[in-house]
Image (cartoon, rainbow, N blue to C red):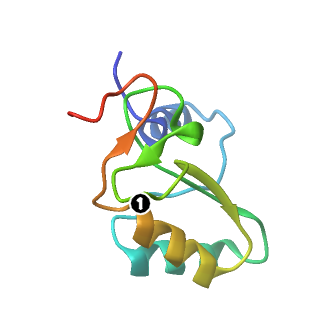
Amino acid sequence: MNIHEHQARELLRKFDVATTRGRVATTFDEAEQIARELGDVDVVVKAQIHAGGRGKGEFKNGFKGGVHIRKTPEDVRQVAANMLGQVLVTHQRSRSE
């Protein structure tokens, strides 16, 4: 099965399996708002791709890493700004994709 992490979490929730409180953001504003709603916790911002190694990957825009932990909504927004709409290259996904 080829699904993203957030899609798997939705499936698990349907069967009452405990999951993290994360949500999907498609804009910088959404990312910041979600971080505010989660409250005073570390927020993990993850690129969603169908390849392994996203934490060690690099975006074509030069931003490094597809997984980041941030403490403030403003920092979450900045990370999202570097990720959204960009291509993440990992050892499993070439630059030509």
Q: Please state which of residues 1 and 10 is positioned toward the viewer in this rendering.
A: 1
Q: Amino acid at mark 1?
A: Met
**Can the viewer see residue 34?**
no
- Is 40 above or below relative to 52? below
Q: Position of residue 68 (x, y in %)?
A: 63, 56
Position of the C terminus, as image quadrant, is top left
- Is 26 above or below relative to 68? below
Position of the N terminus, as image quadrant, is top left
Q: Position of residue 42 (x, y in %)?
A: 76, 65
Residue position for label 1: 83
Extreme residue in the top direction: 1
Residue at image location 66% in from the left, 71% down from the top = 38
The mark tally for this picture is 1
- Is 67 above or below relative to 11? below
Q: Which element carries disc 1, helix, strand or loop? A: helix
- Is 73 above or below relative to 62? below
